[in-house]
Image: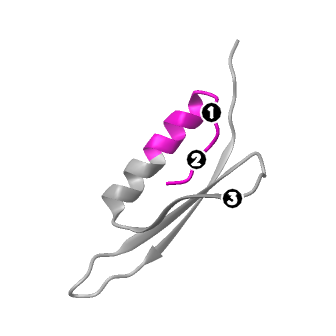
Amino acid sequence: MTISLELWLHIHKTLGDAESRDLYTVALWHELSVPRGICYSRPIDDALAALRRTLEEAGKGGEVERR
């Protein structure tokens, strides 16, 4: 049996300057539920890692969790 999961993704980018990097806030919605913030103002590598962990957990049928 195949289980399907539909997610909505929102990414907010805060531009850095000469002394700081761009930062990203990532939020994920599952089936029109309350948004789950998974990463707040983090560099791109951290934001993508948090997103990957959350998607892997969601694919296992678990709750989408905040990071």
Q: Nearer the viewer, mark 3 or mark 1?
A: 1
Depth order, front residue of 57/18: 57
Residue underneath mark 2: 65
Q: Is residue 64 magenta?
A: yes
- What amino acid type is highlighted by mark number 1? Gly
The stretch of residues the image draws in magenta is 52-67
Residue underneath mark 1: 62
> Are the two marked residues, 2 and 1, in contact with CB atoms closer than 8 angstroms?
yes
The residue at 31%/57% (across/down) is: 45
Query: Which callout, 3 or 1, points at the residue further toward the start of the chain?
Result: 3
| Percent coordinates x, y for residue 16 in the rendering | 32, 82
Where residue 44 is drawn, which disc sits there?
none
Between the C-alphas of marks 2 and 3, the distance is 11 Å
Where residue 35 is drawn, which disc sits there?
3
Element under label 2? Answer: loop
Other residues around mark 3 within 10 Å, as few (<14) / some (14–19) / many (≥20): some
Element under label 1? Answer: loop
| Percent coordinates x, y for residue 55 in the rendering | 53, 40
| Percent coordinates x, y for residue 40 in the rendering | 48, 67
Where's the N terminus, which quadrant? top right
User: In the picture provided, is 61 more to the left or to the right than 18?
Assistant: right
The residue at 58%/47% (across/down) is: 65
User: In the picture provided, is 36 more to the left or to the right than 49?
Assistant: right
